[in-house]
Image (spheres, rainbow, N blue to C red):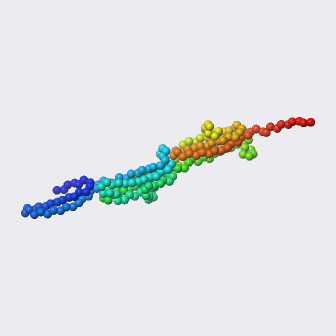
């Protein structure tokens, strides 16, 4: 009589008896595995929101019944072995696991990596004098950019970080000013540029003392 077998290894024994009482027996082993392998992705690194500043992916697969036969891994279509240290940019990690019974399981994970700080390009304009001095009010601006995760913050300080103001800005007070441009991206990378702005709008004072 037919019967169903659960997953696992089964030792089957059969005994046949004819009407004369003669007997024969046979035994055999049946191994059943109807379950697909289980694939796991484990990503470690510095995570900020949806972006990693650095990331390593470990891919593994298990099969409790017949055992794992193969595990094939790709990163953006290129064959890899686990663990995978990821470069900057978006990644699709795809894995296909096959067990010894021929069951196949596939899985994937998407990871975004940005380990580069934002770009800051300051713009400082005015009437230039000698020896690095400006002889007019100075107009200050900057271009902030980040090609991967995008710019999150863009800050400017006219006084070495004591206070922060928006851009564009200007400096009209005579003196030596330590200015700071600061930015962070959505992955948590940060950049800072420090400049010295020297302003002297005042003409020299000439003193004449008559003698004689």
Q: What residue do we see at 86% from left, 36% from top? A: 209
**Looking at the figure, which quarter contains the C terminus?**
top right
Q: Position of residue 203 (x, y in %)?
A: 78, 39
Q: Residue furthest front?
A: 212
Q: Is residue 128 above or below residue 210?
A: below
Q: Is residue 66 left or right of residue 138?
A: left
Q: Is residue 30 left or right of residue 117?
A: left
Q: What residue do we see at 62% from left, 39% from top? A: 161
Q: Which of 139/18 is in front?
A: 18
Q: Is residue 207 left or right of residue 128?
A: right
Q: Residue furthest right?
A: 212
Q: What residue do we see at 19% from left, 61% from top? A: 27
Rendered image quadrant of residue 125: top right
Q: Position of residue 80 (x, y in %)?
A: 44, 58
**Looking at the figure, which quarter contains the N terminus?**
bottom left
Whether residue 44 can be seen here: yes
Rendered image quadrant of residue 24: bottom left
Q: Which of 203/90 is in front?
A: 203
- Total marks shown come to 0
Q: What residue do we see at 75% from left, 45% from top? A: 130
Whether residue 145 can be seen here: no
Q: Position of residue 31 (x, y in %)?
A: 26, 58
Q: Position of residue 54 (x, y in %)?
A: 50, 50
Q: Is residue 23 above or below residue 41?
A: below
């Amino acid at each position: 009589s037919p019967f169903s077998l659960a997953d696992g290894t089964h030792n089957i024994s059969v005994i046949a008896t004819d009407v004369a009482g003669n007997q024969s027996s046979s035994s055999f082993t049946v191994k059943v595995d109807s379950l697909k392998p289980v694939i796991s992705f484990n990503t470690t690194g510095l995570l900020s929101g949806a972006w990693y500043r650095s990331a390593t992916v470990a891919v593994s697969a298990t099969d409790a019944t017949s055992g794992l036969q193969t595990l094939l891994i790709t990163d953006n279509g290129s064959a890899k072995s686990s663990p995978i240290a990821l470069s900057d940019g978006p990644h699709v990690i795809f894995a296909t696991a096959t067990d010894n019974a021929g069951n196949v399981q596939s899985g994937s994970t998407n990871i975004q990596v940005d380990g580069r700080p934002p770009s800051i390009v300051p713009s400082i304009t005015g009437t230039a004098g000698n020896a690095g001095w400006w002889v007019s009010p100075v107009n200050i601006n900057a271009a902030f950019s980040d090609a991967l995760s995008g710019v999150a913050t863009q800050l400017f300080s006219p006084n070495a970080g004591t206070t922060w103001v928006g851009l564009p800005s200007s400096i009209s007070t005579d003196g030596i000013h330590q200015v700071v441009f600061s930015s962070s991206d959505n992955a948590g990378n940060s950049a800072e540029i420090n400049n010295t702005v020297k302003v002297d709008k005042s003409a020299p004072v000439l003193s004449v003392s008559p003698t004689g």
